[in-house]
Amino acid sequence: MKYQQVGFRPFKNKLCVLPVTDSIRPQLADYDQYQDIQSVMVYGYVDHEDGFCFEVISLSKDNESFYEENEVPSVCYESDEILEVDIEILDNFDLENHYFEKILQIQNNQDCASLKWTRELKYLDEYRDFHHIDDVRIYFSLENRATEELWARLEAMIGNDFKVCLLEEPSSSEHHRGQEIILHLLTKKDGKKVLSNVQVERGNDFKV
């Protein structure tokens, strides 16, 4: 299974195995006898700024038994680095239990509960960046101005609304890149759901 084909959902919060290809091996240089490593066990998760990542948990020189080198700084692959790599998902409770502390450490480095919840909302997937999961396309509209499509980064949910940070500069002089605003989930007349700073569809000026 390749990230390029299926996106982040199958790998989120899962132990996986990556074969060590020429593009993957250089990042393992701090490990002992890294040239002999044939595969790595990784944990897939969402990083708020770096996007979807696979952090190395353990190593294998024979593609069967895995071992750990705890004194080596953690190695992490971003999804756009391994787009075409075949990834094997390990649905194995015993392994998850064995690596529980490492997994918990990764999860504890993640974000607030309400931000994590936004990652479960599949209706947002069509607006997400393919790699930076918390980055979404939004529809920004002010009275008497055309609607703009902008990139924004999800920061939290507040009730049924979304707090985001603007990643692009709107044409409006009142708003700026880096500013946090509140968005609403707007259901358009055609049934399509979008994130917008307006709460109702404004006739023909709201074109998406």
Image (spheres, rainbow, N blue to C red):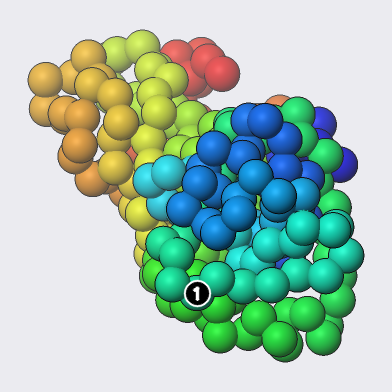
Secondary structure of the residue carrying tag 1 is loop
Residue 114: give x, y in percent of width and height. 45, 68
Q: Residue at x 75, y 70 (%)?
A: 66
Residue 169: give x, y in percent of width and height. 23, 21
Q: Which residue is at the front of the view, 118 or 10?
A: 10
Residue 24: give x, y in percent of width and height. 63, 38
Residue 117: give x, y in percent of width and height. 55, 65
Q: Is residue 188 visible?
A: no
Q: Is residue 40 visible?
A: yes
Return the residue found at the far front: 33
Q: Residue at x 61, y 66 (%)?
A: 57
| Callout 1 crowding tier (Cα within 10 Å): few <14, some 14–19, many ≥20 | few
Amino acid marked by disc 1: Asn
Asked whether, in this view, residue 53 is left or right of residue 14, the answer is: left
Please name the residue that numbered disc 1 is placed on.
70
Return the residue found at the far left: 173
Q: Which residue is at the front of the view, 136 or 206?
A: 136
Q: Which residue is at the front of the view, 97 or 49?
A: 97
Q: Residue at x 60, y 50 (%)?
A: 34
Q: Which residue is at the front of the view, 65 or 164?
A: 65
Q: Quadrant of the N terminus?
A: top right
| Location of residue 128 (image quadrant) | top right
Asked whether, in this view, residue 185 is left or right of residue 41, the answer is: left
Q: Residue at x 55, y 59 (%)?
A: 32
Q: Quadrant of the C terminus?
A: top right
